Image (tube, rainbow, N blue to C red):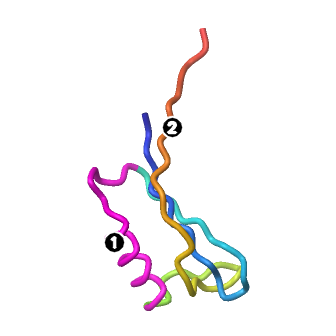
Amino acid sequence: MTKKLQMVFTLDSGKTLTYSLADPKDGLTKVEVEAAMQAVIDKKAIISSNGSPVKIKETSIRSTDEVALA
């Protein structure tokens, strides 16, 4: 099973930007993730062709199972 932390930002253009990180640590909390996301927004650490993040939209951890077919 693989896990990815997904952080979704609202951009100043009204569009969204999803930033994913592989293998987040166990026990990660929403408060911790949102604090990191707010730091990204405050420091203008990410700029995309669609704009800059201005708001936290959502956070989640996505788990995926990969099963080889026989």
Q: Secondary structure at mark 2?
A: strand
Of the pair 62 and 19, the residue shown nearer to us:
62
Residue 34, horizontal then vertical, whole percent: 40, 74
Q: Which residue is mark 2?
A: 64
- How dense is the environment of label 2, judged by Cα within 10 Å: few (below 14), some, or many (20 and up)? few
When asked about the image quadrant of residue 48, the answer is: bottom right
Q: Secondary structure at mark 1?
A: helix
Q: Quadrant of the N terminus?
A: top left
Left or right: where 28 falls relative to 19: left
Left or right: where 32 falls relative to 47: left
Q: Which residue is mark 1?
A: 31
Asked whether residue 36 is drawn in magenta, I would say: yes
Q: Report the amino acid beneath label 1.
A: Val
- How dense is the environment of label 1, judged by Cα within 10 Å: few (below 14), some, or many (20 and up)? few
Taking the spot 59% from the left edge, 65% from the top edge, the residue there is 18
Magenta segment range? Answer: 23-42
